[in-house]
Image (cartoon, rainbow, N blue to C red):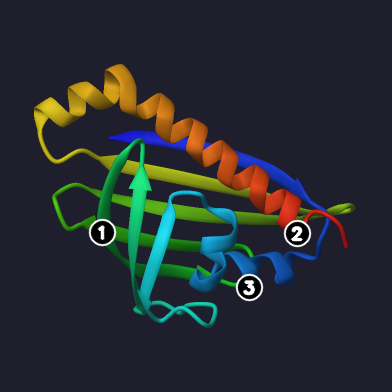
Amino acid sequence: MTTIITEAAIRRPIAEVFDYVTTPAHWLRWHPSSVALRGATDHSLAVGEEVTEDFRVAGRSGSVTWRVIAREAPTRWAIAGKVAAGGSGTITYTLTQTPAGTAFRREFVYAMPNWFAALLDRLFIRRRIAAESAEAVNRLKQTLGSS
C-alpha cells in the first residue's frame, strides 16, 4: 500500500469547503487527474452513494468507481474505489476549522494490481501521483482560497 498526503490552508468556512470537495462535479475544476464523471455528481455525496470517474494519473488512463464509506460533515469524508483494470484505493478528506478558515488534508492510499505494477510504483509512479496530488490541492486552494 502507498499513502500520499497533501494539505492546504483554505480561507473559507469549513462547511463550505466540505460541501465543495465532496461534490464530484467540482472535481473536474480542481483535480487535474479527473477527466469525466458519471453517476451522482451534483451534490455532496452521502455514505453508500457512488460515482464513476474517468481519470488520467501518472500517464495512465482508466476508470474507477468510488463509493462513499464515511461521512462526518463537515470534518471527514472518505471514498473507496476499485479501478476497472485492477487496483484499489481510498481517499479521505479531513477538515479542521482554523481562525483563518479551514485546514484541508487529503490522504490517498492505494494498492497496485500486481507485483510488477507495485515495482513501477515504487520506482516511478508514486512520485508522479504525489506531484499530481499536490497540484490538485494547490488548485483547490486557488479556487477556494479567498473569501
Task: State if disc 1 and disc 2 touch (CB < 8 Å).
Answer: no
Q: What residue is pinned by disc 3? A: 19
Q: Looking at the figure, which quarter contains the C terminus?
A: bottom right
The one of 31 and 75 positioned closer to us in this rendering:
31
* Residue 121: x %, y % from top left: 27, 27
Q: Is residue 103 visible from the viewing direction of this image? A: no
* Secondary-structure class at tag 1: strand
Q: Residues within 10 Å of mark 1 (few under 14, many from 20)?
A: many
Task: Inspect this view and state whether residue 127 appears.
Answer: yes
Q: CA distance from mark 2 to mark 1?
A: 27 Å
Q: Earlier in the sequence, mark 3 or mark 2?
A: 3
Q: Residue furthest top?
A: 123
List x then y, in percent, for residue 126: 36, 28
Inspect the image, locate mark 1, and give the three-letter code of the amino acid beneath it. Answer: Ser
Query: Circle 3: is it few (<14), some (14-19), or many (20+) Cα within 10 Å?
Result: some
Residue type highlighted by circle 2:
Leu
Q: Which residue is mark 1?
A: 63
Q: Nearer the viewer, mark 1 or mark 3?
A: 1
Say whether residue 101 is left or right of residue 32. Answer: right
